[in-house]
Image: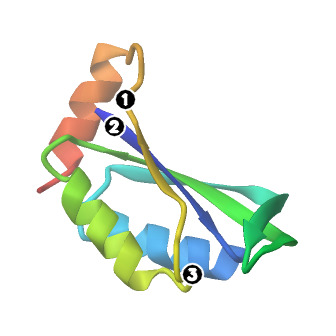
């Protein structure tokens, strides 16, 4: 099982992309977090914006398709899409993610 962390500019876009990814079974679920404030470099300046983080739960077999889908639907020129491998996952949860996700 893999987690894919992505930040979006607002809850509307985060929810729409998350729901579409889950409907396409690219992820078993997507956790849409509350709004947060981010600081980052862009165009040579420190920028500051509100963003919404999403954590997708997916499989090794589906992760490339999920990343491509999110990249295509995302409004940022350079979306933050980061794939993490959990250190440990409850076997029953990992089994559920494997059953509900399709490559």
Note whether residue 25 is visible. Answer: no
Note whether residue 22 is visible. Answer: yes
Contact between marks 1 and 2 (CB within 8 A): the answer is: yes
Picture layout, residue 23 above or below residue 103: below
Q: Residue at image x 36%, y 82%?
A: 72
Rounded to the nearest angstrom, the CA distance separating label 1 from label 3 is 24 Å
Picture layout, residue 103 above or below residue 57: below
Q: Residue at image x 22%, y 28%?
A: 95
Q: Residue at image x 27%, y 38%?
A: 97
Rounded to the nearest angstrom, the CA distance separating label 3 from label 2 is 23 Å
Residue pointed to by mark 3 = 76
Regarding mark 3 in the picture, which secondary structure is present there?
loop
Front tag of 1 and 3? 3
| Residue nearest the observer in this picture, 4 or 78 | 78
Q: Which mark is residue 30?
A: none
Residue pointed to by mark 2 = 2
Picture quarter with the C terminus: bottom left
| Residue nearest the observer in this picture, 99 or 82 | 82
Who comes first in sequence, dot 1 or dot 3? 3
Q: Residue at image x 39%, y 74%?
A: 71
| Residue nearest the observer in this picture, 90 or 58 | 58
* Residue count near mark 3 (Cα–Cα under 10 Å), binned few <14, some 14–19, many ≥20: few
Find residue 48 and report its horizontal and vertical position in percent.
88, 70
Who comes first in sequence, dot 3 or dot 2? 2
Q: Which mark is residue 85?
A: 1
Rounded to the nearest angstrom, the CA distance separating label 1 from label 2 is 5 Å
Judging from the image, the colouring scheme is: rainbow
Find residue 69 and report its horizontal and vertical position in percent.
31, 74
Picture layout, residue 71 above or below residue 30: below
Picture layout, residue 94 above or below residue 56: above
Front tag of 3 and 2? 3
């Amino acid at each position: 099982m893999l987690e894919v962390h992505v930040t979006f500019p607002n809850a509307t876009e985060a929810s729409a992309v998350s729901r579409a990814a889950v409907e396409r079974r690219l992820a078993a679920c997507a956790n849409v977090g509350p709004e947060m404030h981010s600081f980052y470099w862009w165009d040579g300046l420190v920028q500051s914006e509100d963003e919404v983080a999403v954590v997708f739960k997916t499989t090794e077999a589906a992760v490339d398709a999920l990343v491509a889908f999110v990249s295509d639907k995302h409004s940022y020129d350079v979306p933050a899409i980061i794939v993490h491998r959990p250190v440990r996952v409850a076997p029953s949860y990992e089994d559920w993610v494997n059953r509900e996700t399709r490559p």
